[in-house]
């Protein structure tokens, strides 16, 4: 099930054509993100035979490309190929470090919807946290938003879910970045995972928050239900893996750090209170 919040579009694949954000002259907004994930950690987002990558594309609605940098061959060069396409060989100098390779061949996430980009970010961050030994707290990331032939690059950080097993609030900062041309323009994104609140409940909570503080109307939210994957067989993509369960995630994002943070905190607290009320019934 896909949801739509104030100021955001639907994230489902089947509904994508009807909900693409457009500019005033009907040019489609293009959003491209580059994630500088070290090559040795990319296998967890590709999966066996590319099944995890396929799943990521389906649940997020975004196009995701994962270049795979192989070890040096006998001639002292390394090759790079798209993990989900036909092999395309390139070469890198001998001795190129893991981070240099990540910068040269970043993981790319493309969509016409910011909600799809953020959902892909959430799932990639989760996978890196629970299935890899990556020791970084964040992944360097650039998001390029293009409309009316004007591209606005946002340099920022995709945060790794370090406290995924112990975080009782299930709310956190997902992405934080600033535009290159004007550091006062920002993109802040947060996620809240809930167990008992659906899209209708979230919408009612948001209306109450905005009634109290109308200055938060510039913030946006987006509700999404993502099928769970069987942890015992995480590399498969069968419908049986879902067991009828889903993760309920609320995305909060905006261009103002203070307002976005206030909106996120208020929404997280209200969702937590609603869950406690539901558990006592």
Image (cartoon, rainbow, N blue to C red):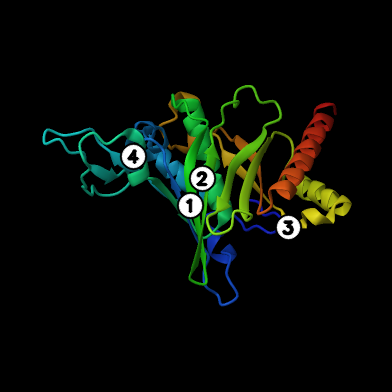
Q: Which mark is residue 100?
A: 4
Q: Which residue is mark 3?
A: 218
Element type where label 3 sits in the image: helix
Indicate the position of residue 274 as horizontal and vertical percent values.
81, 36
First in sequence: mark 3 or mark 2?
2
- Pick whichever, 116 or 277, lies toward us: 116
| Image depth: mark 1 or mark 3 in front | 3
Q: Residue at x 62, y 56 (%)?
A: 185
Q: Which mark is residue 62?
A: 1
Disc 3 to disc 2, how far (Cα)?
A: 23 Å
First in sequence: mark 4 or mark 3?
4
Q: Is residue 106 above or below residue 269?
A: below
Disc 2 to disc 4, how far (Cα)?
A: 23 Å
Q: Is residue 11 visible?
A: no
Element type where label 2 sits in the image: helix
Q: Which residue is mark 2?
A: 120
Tags 1 and 3 in contact by the CB under 8 Å rule?
Answer: no
Tags 1 and 2 in contact by the CB under 8 Å rule?
Answer: yes
Q: Residue furthest left?
A: 75
Marker count (numbered): 4
From the viewer's perspective, is 86 left or right of 204? left
Q: Which mark is residue 39?
A: none
- Pick whichever, 242 or 111, lies toward us: 111
Considering the image in quadrants, where does the C terminus appear? top right
Indicate the position of residue 1 as horizontal and vertical percent values.
62, 48
């Amino acid at each position: 099930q896909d949801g739509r919040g104030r100021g955001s579009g639907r994230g489902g694949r089947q509904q994508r054509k009807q909900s693409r954000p457009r500019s005033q002259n009907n040019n489609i907004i293009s959003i491209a993100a580059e994630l500088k994930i070290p090559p040795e950690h990319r296998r967890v987002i590709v999966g066996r035979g590319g099944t995890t990558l396929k799943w990521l594309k389906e649940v997020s609605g975004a196009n995701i490309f994962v270049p795979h940098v192989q070890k040096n061959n006998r001639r002292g060069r390394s090759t790079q190929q798209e993990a989900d396409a036909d092999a395309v060989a390139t070469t890198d100098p001998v001795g190129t470090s893991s981070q240099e390779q990540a910068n040269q061949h970043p993981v790319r996430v493309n969509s016409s919807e910011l909600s799809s980009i953020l959902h892909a970010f959430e799932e990639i961050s989760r996978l890196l946290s629970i299935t890899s030994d990556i020791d970084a707290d964040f992944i360097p990331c650039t998001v390029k938003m293009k409309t009316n032939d004007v591209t606005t690059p946002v340099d920022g950080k995709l945060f790794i879910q370090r406290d995924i097993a112990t975080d009782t609030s299930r709310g956190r900062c997902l992405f934080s970045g600033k535009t290159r041309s004007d550091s006062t323009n920002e993109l802040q994104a947060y996620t809240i995972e809930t167990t008992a609140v659906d899209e209708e409940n979230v919408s009612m909570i948001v209306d109450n928050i905005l009634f109290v503080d109308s200055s938060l109307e510039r913030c946006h939210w987006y509700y999404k239900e993502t099928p769970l994957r069987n942890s015992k067989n995480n590399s498969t993509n069968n419908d049986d893996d879902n067991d009828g369960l889903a993760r309920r995630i609320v995305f909060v994002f905006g261009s103002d750090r203070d307002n976005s943070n206030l909106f996120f905190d208020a929404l997280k607290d209200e969702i937590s209170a609603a869950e406690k009320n539901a558990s006592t019934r």
